[in-house]
Amino acid sequence: MKSGKLHFPPWLIVFALLTAWIISCTHTANIDNIPVVCFEKDVLPVFQNNCAIPGCHDGTRSGRAFNTYTSIRREVTPGKPYSSQLYQAIIGSGGNRMPPSAPLSIENRTIISVWIGQGANLTTCNDTTTTGGGGGTVGTLRACYTRDIQPVLSSHCAMTGCHDISTHTDYVFYSYSSTMGAVSPGNPSGSKLYQSLLASGEDKMPPLSKPQLTTAQIDSIRNWISYGALDQTCAISCDTINPVTFSGTIWPIMQSSCTGCHGGAGGITFTGYTDVSALAASGTLMNAITGNGVSRMPPGGPFTTCQIRQFQIWVTNGHLNN
């Protein structure tokens, strides 16, 4: 079914639930006063990223699968979170808790509880959220570490002379494990990484003399931390069927993975179309992306096969400013 109600971000759902709990002084909030939770955008990603992973509940072996609405709906009692076996497992303890490796964040547990309480319906909502990575709208508020976070950190923070492993002694951002030293899962405001992005003066990171993160990239980092700062690998939205454009395809990828290192004065710079087009015309761009005779770029990890194909299409079609 398609919900006709207005959709609000998950953090607002949590706030509303806690506010209702405080006002009523009971452990049961009035579910009718809480904005509708969208299954496809708010609920399904929780299960896909934490439960329906290889070797667990992905549907490739016998047992419960949590990768579709039908399979998830089978394990809940609509309107009654605490009577639902699935929710009991999520809030369980010890060996009875799921996922067994780490509990879901309070926000994720609340989203599932509210969804069940609202009837566990197949609700869908319009979503125009874009991630910090290159690829545009992906239909989810989730930010995944390998797709959205590490490329930005590699480009803007972990370059030589800054927070790379050979330069800095306290905070380094070249891998998930090192990045977690500056992150408090579920608490962006308490995470040194996020604090430094919003700081001013000498505490500001990157320094004001360096290329800055976009608002979308900062939002992705906040979102990633809010949802538990998990080490997730997610598919990248990549389209080689529809026209590949500079503004809609190439430049967003470069903003995520290149401009942090190549956005300042000196050396190879990427400040916009003119710089990128010149390197495309000379062959330097594709040589660097594919590692043809030079060190492969970006150093934080190569582009996907699909992304490389997008660059090839754009260059072959005349590297237009489209």
Image (tube, rainbow, N blue to C red):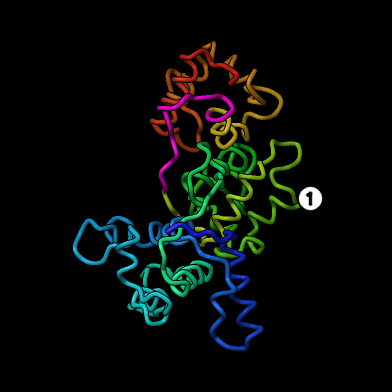
Quadrant of the frame with the N terminus:
bottom left
User: Percent from the top left, x then y, of residue 11?
Assistant: 60, 64
- Disc 1, SS: loop
Residue drawn at (44%, 20%), measured in percent from left and top?
312
Residue 236 magenta: yes
Tell me which segment is drawn in magenta: 234-249
User: Percent from the top left, x then y, of residue 150?
Assistant: 52, 45
Q: Nearer the viewer, residue 25 or 171?
A: 25
Residue drawn at (69%, 50%), measured in percent from left and top?
197
User: Looking at the picture, does residue 135 appear above or below residue 183?
Assistant: above
User: Looking at the picture, does residue 262 appear above or below residue 301?
Assistant: above
| Kind of residue sitting beneath label 1 | Ser
Q: Nearer the viewer, residue 221 or 109?
A: 109
Q: Nearer the viewer, residue 188 or 170?
A: 188
Tell whether 286 sits left or right of 274: left
User: Percent from the top left, x then y, of residue 170?
Assistant: 62, 54
Q: Which residue is mark 1?
A: 200
Q: Residue furthest right?
A: 201
User: Looking at the picture, does residue 290 appear above or below residue 228?
Assistant: above
